[in-house]
Amino acid sequence: MVKKYFSEVRVLYADTDAMGIVYYGNYAKWFELGRCEFLRQAGHPYSELEREGIWLPVIEIVCNYKHPAVYDDVLEIAAWLGELNGASLAIEYEIRKKETGALVVVGRTRHAVTDHSLKPVKIRRDYPELYAFMRDCLKDD
């Protein structure tokens, strides 16, 4: 099984819409939280990648809504590396209600791997240590 990294967020009242459920746009923000925590927990915080000259701009986002979340729910965000290509990668997400385990959303973000001028970077060639780490993230335990 691919290694998943976990983080949590509590739904604020401001995160909900007029129907009292989490506004759909918040999931993109929580995907980012999951992605940043995945990198941090794995020993490669995004701030470190930026210092090394690596950016990971989002080039695609997919979010499938399964069950509504509401104010004061504690949500558990699971994030893991789903795909690694020459100059791009994809992160997969599941967000569940911590108390019940109910699946709230599943999603995916695809990222280009670029330098600070947004020029594609071949991670395997230019950052072999980071590539090896990411390749290992894809392995089944």
Image (tube, rainbow, N blue to C red):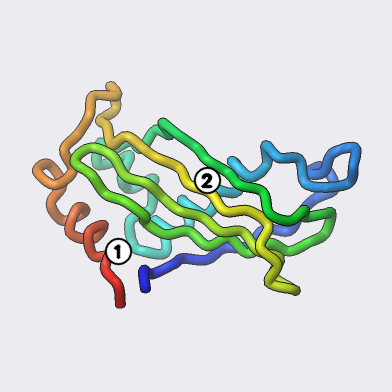
- Label 2 sits on a secondary structure element that is helix
Residue 109: quadrant of the picture:
top left
Using a 10 Å C-alpha cutoff, classify the residue at mark 2 as few (fewer than 14 neighbours), some (14 to 19) or many (20 or more): some
Which residue is label 2 attached to? 32
Nearer-the-camera pick, 109 or 15: 109
Which image quarter is the C terminus in? bottom left
- Residue shown at 53% from the left, 49% from the top: 107
Q: Given the current orientation, which residue lies at the most extreme left position? A: 125
Kind of residue indicated by mark 1: Cys
Residue 137 disc label: 1
Q: Is residue 129 above or below residue 123?
A: below
Classify residue 34 as left or right of residue 80.
right
Which image quarter is the N terminus in? bottom left
Residue 90 is situated, as x and y percent measured from the top left of the image, at 37, 46
Classify residue 133 as left or right of residue 33.
left
Q: Nearer the viewer, mark 1 or mark 2?
A: 1
Kind of residue indicated by mark 2: Glu
Q: Given the current orientation, which residue lies at the most extreme bottom position? A: 141
